[in-house]
Image (spheres, rainbow, N blue to C red):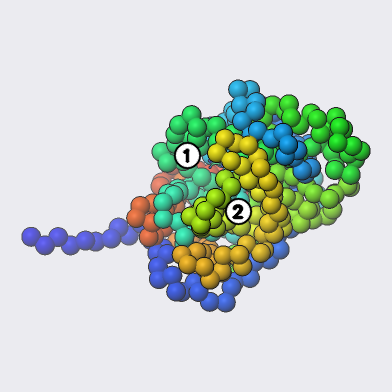
Amino acid sequence: MERSIRSDPNIHKFSIHPFKRFNKRSVEYKQPVEITSFSYDENHQLHMDDRELRYYYPPNLKDCNLSAGYENFIQKIVEGPEPIHSLLDALIHLRKTRAETENVIKADIISWRGIFTKMLCTPYNRNEPWEFGATLYNNTIFIEEHETEYTRRNREGDTPKAKLMGYWGYKFEALSTIGVPATEIQSSDDPELLARKNTVVNTNIQYCSVSKTTLGKNRLIMGAEVDCLIDVKPPYPENPVNKYIELKTSKIPRNDRDTFVFERYKLIKFWAQSFLIGIPKIIVGFRDDDGNLCSLKEIKTLEIPRMVRGKDKMWDAVICLNFLNEFFEWLREVIKIEDANSSYVISFKEPFQEIEVSFCHNKNPVLADRHLKPFGKV
Ligand code: A3P
Ligand code: MG
Ligand code: MG
């Protein structure tokens, strides 16, 4: 008997194919402007200030084992993806404290930068499933990440070695930053520099920048954890995003295969993460297999697309941006039900061909009750 395959009208699908349709003149992405910032302290308590902002100071490569202090590592109290709540609290705080900011917290899509990064890399993603939840409220789509089996395994590390390697990235940040501007450092034995070696790595601590921008006609607000500032003395610049630095660790490439993996899988994420909030420079700490930091390389974010352009089996930043723009346009068409108690599930999974969107009545609302009035119609 022939069975008819009828597609479910409640499930919407956006195919990443044909790829060709994104290969055209790039959509405009405006320079992001920071609208506010906030911090989480060592207990993951939220503060509407920049108390956890750090400054870049090159690490001492002569004494740089990234495994040091692993036994004292303090991991974030809240497990799983960060809800969007603190970002929304920061936006509400901004509007309360700055009278002229009535409209600044309006956008078409509000989310964490990490979510936008995953979306932006989707055309070239063939093995990392993601799932997000979205609530439409007062013409804004609020998006947060859902914990899945895949993200849980990835976050915790499958093996003791993977867990240790997860620590290396944070340790590199601890060894490369100080609490005062670099201009205040007088000598190489300055206590600020010496203290870094013994810093207990605590991932509860974060400094977050919130910026606003537009991709084509899509107005976006995103919150992002930022590693540090460079070449800045207080008072801070009006729009500090072009003084922020992203710190990254990576394995030293030893052969063509390593270089290919670095350019194909790592550089796309480095670029997407920093480009989205306008961070101009990434400092990569190259390490060996035992976690010894061996060299540093500065990479300009805007130069990354050119570094990989035309190479076999690589990626193209223009395709990523055009894809994201058209995906957002489509998302704003299909996410129509405005219900603060419900959410849509947006997912990308095996066989990594299309993004699926479905409505979940009375499930996993993204906004908390306290956000409804401030983000509601005035
Ligand atoms: P690396 O990116 O150098 O590996 P970020 O660089 O985005 O600020 O993140 C800091 C560090 O957090 C990362 O350093 C890595 O160690 C860890 N980290 C971030 N996201 C992760 C993830 N999805 N899985 C495992 N570790 C992660
Ligand atoms: Mg970071
Ligand atoms: Mg970093």
Q: Residues within 10 Å of mark 1 (few under 14, many from 20)?
A: some
In the picture, measured across the screen, residue 240 lies left or right of residue 304, that is right
- Residue name at image x 75 percent, y 38 percent: 60
Q: Secondary structure at mark 1?
A: helix
Can see residue 57? yes
Which residue position is annotated with label 2? 270
Q: Quadrant of residue 169?
A: top right
Determine whether, in the image, residue 101 is placed left or right of residue 140.
right
Q: Is mark 1 within 8 Å of ligand 1?
A: yes
Considering the image in quadrants, where does the N terminus appear? bottom left
Q: Quadrant of residue 103?
A: bottom right
Q: Position of residue 292 (x, y in %)?
A: 63, 37
Residue 208 coordinates in the image, percent (x, y): 70, 44
Front residue of this view, candidates 67 and 79: 67
Q: In the rendering, at what x and y percent does residue 299 appear?
A: 68, 56
Looking at the rendered structure, the kind of residue marked 2 is: Phe
